[in-house]
Image (tube, rainbow, N blue to C red):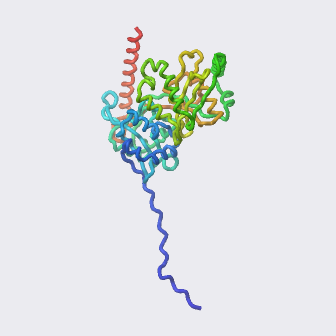
Amino acid sequence: MTARSAPLHPPLPSPSPSPVAEPSWAVATLADLSREPGPWDALVARADRPSPDYSRRMLEAHRDYGLAPPDLPCLAVRRGPDLLALLPFRIGRGPLGLGRVARPFASPYLTVTAPLVAGGPEEAPALAALAAGMRDLGCPWWWPLLPTADGPSGPALLGALGRDGWGVEEVSHILRPVLSRRPSHDAFLRDHPHKGRLKDLRRRRRRLEEAGRVALEAVGPGGDLEAAVAEFLDLERRGWKGRAGTALACRPATAGFARALFRPGDGPVTGRADLLRLDGRVIAASLALVCGGTATLLKTAYDEEQRRLAPGVLLEAEIVRALHETRFAERLDSATLASAVLDDLYYPERARIAEIVASPPGGPPPGRLAARARAQAAAKGWIKARLSGFRGR
Protein backbone atom coordinates (compact mmCIF):
# COMPACT_ATOMS: atom_id res chain seq x y z
CA MET A 1 0.00 0.00 0.00
CA THR A 2 1.38 3.35 -0.92
CA ALA A 3 1.76 5.71 2.01
CA ARG A 4 -0.09 9.02 1.74
CA SER A 5 2.25 11.96 1.56
CA ALA A 6 1.93 14.81 4.05
CA PRO A 7 0.32 17.97 2.68
CA LEU A 8 2.79 20.47 1.30
CA HIS A 9 1.09 23.31 3.23
CA PRO A 10 -0.27 22.38 6.66
CA PRO A 11 -3.60 24.07 7.49
CA LEU A 12 -3.28 27.51 9.03
CA PRO A 13 -4.57 27.92 12.57
CA SER A 14 -8.00 29.51 12.84
CA PRO A 15 -7.68 33.23 13.43
CA SER A 16 -8.66 34.37 16.91
CA PRO A 17 -11.63 36.71 16.96
CA SER A 18 -10.74 40.37 16.81
CA PRO A 19 -11.29 42.18 20.11
CA VAL A 20 -14.35 44.39 20.16
CA ALA A 21 -13.35 48.02 20.25
CA GLU A 22 -14.42 49.99 23.29
CA PRO A 23 -16.82 52.87 22.69
CA SER A 24 -15.21 56.27 22.35
CA TRP A 25 -16.64 59.74 22.85
CA ALA A 26 -16.20 62.99 20.95
CA VAL A 27 -17.88 66.37 20.83
CA ALA A 28 -19.94 66.81 17.65
CA THR A 29 -22.29 69.58 16.64
CA LEU A 30 -25.97 69.36 15.89
CA ALA A 31 -25.12 70.06 12.25
CA ASP A 32 -22.65 67.14 12.25
CA LEU A 33 -25.25 64.75 13.64
CA SER A 34 -27.88 65.85 11.14
CA ARG A 35 -25.62 64.61 8.36
CA GLU A 36 -25.97 61.09 9.83
CA PRO A 37 -29.72 60.60 10.21
CA GLY A 38 -29.53 56.80 10.09
CA PRO A 39 -27.35 56.22 13.19
CA TRP A 40 -29.28 58.88 15.13
CA ASP A 41 -32.67 57.32 14.38
CA ALA A 42 -31.23 53.86 15.08
CA LEU A 43 -30.08 55.02 18.53
CA VAL A 44 -33.60 56.21 19.39
CA ALA A 45 -35.04 52.91 18.17
CA ARG A 46 -32.63 50.77 20.23
CA ALA A 47 -32.65 52.88 23.42
CA ASP A 48 -34.40 51.53 26.51
CA ARG A 49 -37.63 53.54 26.98
CA PRO A 50 -36.33 56.61 25.16
CA SER A 51 -37.93 60.01 25.39
CA PRO A 52 -38.42 62.08 22.22
CA ASP A 53 -36.54 65.05 23.67
CA TYR A 54 -33.14 64.41 22.10
CA SER A 55 -34.47 62.67 19.01
CA ARG A 56 -33.63 63.94 15.54
CA ARG A 57 -37.21 65.11 15.01
CA MET A 58 -37.12 67.27 18.15
CA LEU A 59 -33.64 68.77 17.86
CA GLU A 60 -33.82 69.47 14.14
CA ALA A 61 -37.14 71.28 14.67
CA HIS A 62 -35.40 73.36 17.34
CA ARG A 63 -32.55 74.13 14.93
CA ASP A 64 -34.76 74.95 11.95
CA TYR A 65 -36.79 77.52 13.90
CA GLY A 66 -34.06 79.26 15.86
CA LEU A 67 -34.52 77.46 19.17
CA ALA A 68 -31.12 75.72 19.01
CA PRO A 69 -27.98 76.72 17.09
CA PRO A 70 -26.55 74.47 14.36
CA ASP A 71 -23.26 74.42 16.29
CA LEU A 72 -24.90 73.18 19.52
CA PRO A 73 -22.26 70.86 21.06
CA CYS A 74 -23.22 67.25 21.70
CA LEU A 75 -21.32 64.50 23.48
CA ALA A 76 -21.54 61.56 21.09
CA VAL A 77 -20.43 58.03 22.03
CA ARG A 78 -19.70 55.69 19.13
CA ARG A 79 -18.47 52.23 18.40
CA GLY A 80 -17.47 52.20 14.77
CA PRO A 81 -20.32 53.67 12.71
CA ASP A 82 -22.88 53.07 15.48
CA LEU A 83 -24.05 55.90 17.71
CA LEU A 84 -24.42 54.55 21.26
CA ALA A 85 -25.15 57.67 23.32
CA LEU A 86 -25.99 61.31 22.74
CA LEU A 87 -26.11 64.30 25.09
CA PRO A 88 -26.50 67.88 23.77
CA PHE A 89 -25.11 70.43 26.23
CA ARG A 90 -24.07 74.01 26.88
CA ILE A 91 -21.32 75.48 29.06
CA GLY A 92 -21.85 78.77 30.87
CA ARG A 93 -22.15 80.48 34.24
CA GLY A 94 -23.78 78.57 37.06
CA PRO A 95 -26.11 79.77 39.83
CA LEU A 96 -25.01 82.60 42.14
CA GLY A 97 -21.46 82.88 40.90
CA LEU A 98 -20.91 79.15 40.84
CA GLY A 99 -18.50 79.55 37.95
CA ARG A 100 -18.24 77.57 34.76
CA VAL A 101 -20.74 74.70 34.59
CA ALA A 102 -22.08 72.41 31.91
CA ARG A 103 -25.76 71.68 31.61
CA PRO A 104 -27.84 69.55 29.22
CA PHE A 105 -29.55 71.44 26.45
CA ALA A 106 -33.02 72.51 27.56
CA SER A 107 -35.89 74.54 26.14
CA PRO A 108 -39.52 75.22 27.07
CA TYR A 109 -40.48 72.34 24.77
CA LEU A 110 -38.34 69.60 26.35
CA THR A 111 -39.83 67.44 29.09
CA VAL A 112 -36.69 65.62 30.32
CA THR A 113 -32.96 65.99 29.70
CA ALA A 114 -31.87 62.37 30.00
CA PRO A 115 -29.24 61.36 27.44
CA LEU A 116 -30.14 58.99 24.66
CA VAL A 117 -28.35 55.70 25.41
CA ALA A 118 -28.49 52.36 23.60
CA GLY A 119 -30.15 49.64 25.63
CA GLY A 120 -29.10 46.06 26.29
CA PRO A 121 -25.43 45.05 26.54
CA GLU A 122 -24.32 48.33 24.96
CA GLU A 123 -25.75 50.44 27.79
CA ALA A 124 -23.02 50.05 30.43
CA PRO A 125 -20.00 50.70 28.15
CA ALA A 126 -21.83 53.57 26.45
CA LEU A 127 -22.58 55.22 29.80
CA ALA A 128 -19.00 54.70 30.97
CA ALA A 129 -17.73 56.49 27.87
CA LEU A 130 -20.31 59.25 28.33
CA ALA A 131 -19.23 59.78 31.95
CA ALA A 132 -15.60 59.99 30.81
CA GLY A 133 -16.54 62.59 28.20
CA MET A 134 -18.42 64.64 30.78
CA ARG A 135 -15.40 64.46 33.11
CA ASP A 136 -12.99 65.58 30.42
CA LEU A 137 -14.99 68.76 29.88
CA GLY A 138 -13.47 69.79 33.21
CA CYS A 139 -16.42 71.36 35.04
CA PRO A 140 -19.39 70.45 37.22
CA TRP A 141 -22.82 69.79 35.73
CA TRP A 142 -26.05 71.51 36.71
CA TRP A 143 -28.78 69.15 35.52
CA PRO A 144 -32.53 69.92 35.53
CA LEU A 145 -35.33 67.57 34.47
CA LEU A 146 -33.49 64.27 34.97
CA PRO A 147 -35.63 61.18 35.71
CA THR A 148 -33.86 59.67 38.71
CA ALA A 149 -36.04 56.72 39.73
CA ASP A 150 -37.57 55.58 36.46
CA GLY A 151 -37.63 56.33 32.77
CA PRO A 152 -35.01 56.87 30.11
CA SER A 153 -31.44 56.20 31.27
CA GLY A 154 -31.49 58.54 34.29
CA PRO A 155 -30.89 55.96 37.05
CA ALA A 156 -28.31 54.15 34.92
CA LEU A 157 -26.52 57.46 34.28
CA LEU A 158 -26.31 58.18 38.02
CA GLY A 159 -24.80 54.74 38.54
CA ALA A 160 -22.20 55.34 35.83
CA LEU A 161 -21.27 58.71 37.33
CA GLY A 162 -20.83 57.09 40.74
CA ARG A 163 -18.52 54.43 39.31
CA ASP A 164 -16.52 57.19 37.61
CA GLY A 165 -15.96 58.97 40.91
CA TRP A 166 -18.48 61.80 40.58
CA GLY A 167 -20.29 63.36 43.51
CA VAL A 168 -24.02 63.90 42.96
CA GLU A 169 -26.62 65.74 45.03
CA GLU A 170 -30.28 66.43 44.37
CA VAL A 171 -31.39 70.06 44.43
CA SER A 172 -35.14 69.48 44.13
CA HIS A 173 -37.64 67.18 42.45
CA ILE A 174 -41.23 66.93 41.24
CA LEU A 175 -43.52 63.92 40.84
CA ARG A 176 -44.96 63.87 37.33
CA PRO A 177 -48.22 61.97 36.65
CA VAL A 178 -47.78 59.02 34.27
CA LEU A 179 -50.11 56.16 33.42
CA SER A 180 -49.28 52.62 32.31
CA ARG A 181 -51.90 50.86 30.24
CA ARG A 182 -54.07 48.39 32.17
CA PRO A 183 -55.45 45.15 30.67
CA SER A 184 -58.62 47.06 29.72
CA HIS A 185 -60.35 50.40 30.21
CA ASP A 186 -62.90 48.66 32.43
CA ALA A 187 -60.04 47.46 34.65
CA PHE A 188 -58.70 51.02 34.81
CA LEU A 189 -62.10 52.34 35.91
CA ARG A 190 -62.77 49.48 38.33
CA ASP A 191 -59.50 49.92 40.22
CA HIS A 192 -59.47 53.73 40.17
CA PRO A 193 -59.40 55.08 43.75
CA HIS A 194 -61.00 58.46 42.96
CA LYS A 195 -64.56 57.35 42.20
CA GLY A 196 -65.87 60.85 42.89
CA ARG A 197 -63.59 62.26 40.20
CA LEU A 198 -64.83 59.73 37.65
CA LYS A 199 -68.44 60.49 38.59
CA ASP A 200 -67.79 64.21 38.07
CA LEU A 201 -66.31 63.53 34.63
CA ARG A 202 -69.36 61.48 33.63
CA ARG A 203 -71.63 64.31 34.77
CA ARG A 204 -69.68 66.88 32.76
CA ARG A 205 -69.71 64.61 29.73
CA ARG A 206 -73.50 64.33 29.91
CA ARG A 207 -73.81 68.11 30.09
CA LEU A 208 -71.54 68.45 27.09
CA GLU A 209 -73.67 65.98 25.13
CA GLU A 210 -76.76 67.98 26.04
CA ALA A 211 -75.11 71.02 24.43
CA GLY A 212 -74.58 69.32 21.06
CA ARG A 213 -72.98 66.47 19.15
CA VAL A 214 -69.73 65.35 20.80
CA ALA A 215 -67.00 63.53 18.88
CA LEU A 216 -63.39 62.57 19.55
CA GLU A 217 -60.99 62.61 16.61
CA ALA A 218 -57.62 60.86 16.92
CA VAL A 219 -55.04 61.63 14.22
CA GLY A 220 -51.93 59.48 13.91
CA PRO A 221 -48.80 59.68 11.73
CA GLY A 222 -50.71 58.58 8.64
CA GLY A 223 -53.55 61.06 9.11
CA ASP A 224 -54.00 64.74 8.41
CA LEU A 225 -51.75 66.01 11.18
CA GLU A 226 -51.20 69.30 9.37
CA ALA A 227 -54.90 70.17 9.68
CA ALA A 228 -55.02 68.96 13.29
CA VAL A 229 -52.01 71.09 14.26
CA ALA A 230 -53.59 74.11 12.55
CA GLU A 231 -56.75 73.63 14.62
CA PHE A 232 -54.70 73.33 17.80
CA LEU A 233 -52.77 76.51 17.02
CA ASP A 234 -55.98 78.43 16.41
CA LEU A 235 -57.58 77.14 19.62
CA GLU A 236 -54.55 77.98 21.76
CA ARG A 237 -54.25 81.45 20.21
CA ARG A 238 -57.87 82.24 21.17
CA GLY A 239 -57.19 81.48 24.86
CA TRP A 240 -55.24 83.14 27.64
CA LYS A 241 -51.91 82.23 26.07
CA GLY A 242 -52.89 84.17 22.98
CA ARG A 243 -53.78 87.20 25.10
CA ALA A 244 -50.45 86.90 26.92
CA GLY A 245 -48.54 86.52 23.65
CA THR A 246 -47.18 83.08 24.60
CA ALA A 247 -49.30 80.87 22.34
CA LEU A 248 -47.33 79.02 19.68
CA ALA A 249 -49.23 80.85 16.92
CA CYS A 250 -48.17 84.26 18.27
CA ARG A 251 -44.76 83.96 16.60
CA PRO A 252 -44.00 82.55 13.14
CA ALA A 253 -40.97 80.68 14.52
CA THR A 254 -42.89 78.78 17.21
CA ALA A 255 -45.82 78.11 14.88
CA GLY A 256 -43.39 76.64 12.35
CA PHE A 257 -41.71 74.66 15.11
CA ALA A 258 -45.04 73.06 16.07
CA ARG A 259 -45.83 72.15 12.46
CA ALA A 260 -42.39 70.56 12.03
CA LEU A 261 -42.46 68.71 15.34
CA PHE A 262 -45.91 67.17 14.89
CA ARG A 263 -45.63 66.60 11.14
CA PRO A 264 -46.88 63.40 9.50
CA GLY A 265 -44.47 60.56 8.86
CA ASP A 266 -43.05 57.37 10.31
CA GLY A 267 -39.85 56.75 12.25
CA PRO A 268 -38.84 56.12 15.87
CA VAL A 269 -40.79 59.25 16.90
CA THR A 270 -44.26 59.96 15.49
CA GLY A 271 -46.83 62.69 15.99
CA ARG A 272 -50.35 62.32 17.31
CA ALA A 273 -53.25 64.73 17.82
CA ASP A 274 -56.48 64.22 19.76
CA LEU A 275 -59.35 66.65 19.15
CA LEU A 276 -62.59 66.90 21.13
CA ARG A 277 -65.35 68.43 18.99
CA LEU A 278 -68.72 69.90 19.86
CA ASP A 279 -70.97 70.18 16.78
CA GLY A 280 -67.83 69.93 14.65
CA ARG A 281 -65.98 72.75 16.44
CA VAL A 282 -62.78 71.89 18.33
CA ILE A 283 -63.19 72.65 22.05
CA ALA A 284 -60.09 70.82 23.31
CA ALA A 285 -56.94 69.59 21.58
CA SER A 286 -53.82 67.67 22.56
CA LEU A 287 -50.57 67.22 20.63
CA ALA A 288 -48.29 64.31 21.52
CA LEU A 289 -45.17 62.50 20.40
CA VAL A 290 -45.09 58.71 20.57
CA CYS A 291 -41.64 57.19 21.15
CA GLY A 292 -40.52 53.88 22.59
CA GLY A 293 -44.05 52.90 23.62
CA THR A 294 -44.73 56.15 25.51
CA ALA A 295 -47.03 58.94 24.34
CA THR A 296 -45.72 62.23 25.72
CA LEU A 297 -48.59 64.74 25.86
CA LEU A 298 -46.67 67.89 25.06
CA LYS A 299 -49.34 70.50 24.39
CA THR A 300 -52.98 70.90 25.40
CA ALA A 301 -55.48 73.70 24.77
CA TYR A 302 -59.21 74.12 25.39
CA ASP A 303 -62.05 76.49 24.58
CA GLU A 304 -62.38 78.86 27.53
CA GLU A 305 -66.04 79.54 26.71
CA GLN A 306 -66.71 75.91 27.69
CA ARG A 307 -64.59 76.08 30.86
CA ARG A 308 -67.44 75.03 33.18
CA LEU A 309 -67.66 71.69 31.34
CA ALA A 310 -63.89 71.08 31.70
CA PRO A 311 -63.30 70.12 28.06
CA GLY A 312 -59.56 69.77 28.61
CA VAL A 313 -60.01 67.19 31.37
CA LEU A 314 -62.70 65.41 29.37
CA LEU A 315 -60.25 65.13 26.50
CA GLU A 316 -57.58 63.71 28.84
CA ALA A 317 -60.10 61.10 29.99
CA GLU A 318 -60.89 60.21 26.38
CA ILE A 319 -57.18 59.83 25.63
CA VAL A 320 -56.98 57.35 28.53
CA ARG A 321 -59.90 55.44 27.00
CA ALA A 322 -58.20 55.43 23.58
CA LEU A 323 -54.96 54.21 25.16
CA HIS A 324 -56.77 51.08 26.32
CA GLU A 325 -59.10 50.56 23.37
CA THR A 326 -56.71 51.25 20.47
CA ARG A 327 -53.42 50.46 22.30
CA PHE A 328 -51.58 53.25 20.50
CA ALA A 329 -48.98 53.28 23.31
CA GLU A 330 -48.05 51.42 26.46
CA ARG A 331 -47.85 54.48 28.66
CA LEU A 332 -48.94 58.13 28.88
CA ASP A 333 -46.58 60.82 30.14
CA SER A 334 -48.35 64.00 31.21
CA ALA A 335 -45.19 66.07 30.53
CA THR A 336 -46.24 68.48 33.29
CA LEU A 337 -44.23 70.16 36.01
CA ALA A 338 -47.20 69.85 38.35
CA SER A 339 -50.84 68.99 37.68
CA ALA A 340 -53.51 68.66 40.36
CA VAL A 341 -55.98 67.80 37.58
CA LEU A 342 -54.03 64.82 36.28
CA ASP A 343 -53.05 63.74 39.80
CA ASP A 344 -56.67 62.60 40.17
CA LEU A 345 -56.92 60.97 36.74
CA TYR A 346 -53.53 59.23 36.51
CA TYR A 347 -52.78 56.94 39.42
CA PRO A 348 -50.78 55.76 41.31
CA GLU A 349 -47.69 56.08 39.15
CA ARG A 350 -45.43 59.08 39.33
CA ALA A 351 -42.14 59.73 37.56
CA ARG A 352 -39.58 61.41 39.82
CA ILE A 353 -38.04 64.27 37.83
CA ALA A 354 -35.11 65.88 39.63
CA GLU A 355 -32.73 68.78 39.39
CA ILE A 356 -29.26 67.59 40.38
CA VAL A 357 -25.71 68.86 40.50
CA ALA A 358 -22.82 66.55 39.64
CA SER A 359 -19.19 67.27 40.46
CA PRO A 360 -16.35 65.38 38.74
CA PRO A 361 -13.52 63.70 40.65
CA GLY A 362 -11.48 66.44 42.34
CA GLY A 363 -14.21 69.02 41.77
CA PRO A 364 -16.06 71.19 44.30
CA PRO A 365 -18.25 69.45 46.89
CA PRO A 366 -21.66 68.71 45.36
CA GLY A 367 -23.38 69.81 48.57
CA ARG A 368 -22.02 73.34 48.16
CA LEU A 369 -23.13 73.42 44.52
CA ALA A 370 -26.61 72.22 45.46
CA ALA A 371 -26.90 74.83 48.23
CA ARG A 372 -26.16 77.60 45.75
CA ALA A 373 -28.65 76.23 43.27
CA ARG A 374 -31.32 76.11 46.00
CA ALA A 375 -30.48 79.68 47.03
CA GLN A 376 -30.92 80.89 43.47
CA ALA A 377 -34.26 79.10 43.16
CA ALA A 378 -35.43 80.67 46.43
CA ALA A 379 -34.37 84.13 45.25
CA LYS A 380 -36.24 83.71 41.98
CA GLY A 381 -39.32 82.53 43.86
CA TRP A 382 -39.18 85.57 46.16
CA ILE A 383 -38.86 87.97 43.22
CA LYS A 384 -41.73 86.28 41.40
CA ALA A 385 -43.95 86.52 44.47
CA ARG A 386 -43.11 90.20 44.94
CA LEU A 387 -43.88 90.97 41.30
CA SER A 388 -47.20 89.13 41.56
CA GLY A 389 -48.02 91.17 44.65
CA PHE A 390 -47.29 94.45 42.86
CA ARG A 391 -49.47 93.43 39.90
CA GLY A 392 -52.32 92.59 42.25
CA ARG A 393 -52.43 96.07 43.80
Residue drawn at the location 65% of the way across and 21% of the way down: 213
| Foreground pick, 165 / 200 | 200
User: Which image quarter: residue 165?
Assistant: top left
Residue lying at the far top of the rendered structure: 393
Q: Quadrant of the N terminus?
A: bottom right
| Foreground pick, 258 / 204 | 258
On the image, the x and y values in percent for residue 41 come to 48, 45
On the image, the x and y values in percent for residue 100 come to 31, 35
Left or right of 135? Residue 261 is right
Q: Confirm whether residue 196 shows in the render.
A: no
Q: Confirm whether residue 306 shows in the render.
A: yes
| Foreground pick, 134 / 219 | 219
Left or right of 329? Residue 367 is left
Residue drawn at the location 51% of the way across and 22% of the way down: 235
| Foreground pick, 252 / 289 | 252
For residue 365, above or below residue 17: above
Residue drawn at the location 53% of the way across and 17% of the way down: 304
How many numbered marks appear?
0
Residue lying at the far bottom of the rendered structure: 1
Left or right of 334? Residue 115 is left
Residue drawn at the location 52% of the way across and 48% of the way down: 120
For residue 57, above or below residue 195: below
Q: Quadrant of the C terminus?
A: top left
On the image, the x and y values in percent for residue 181 come to 62, 34
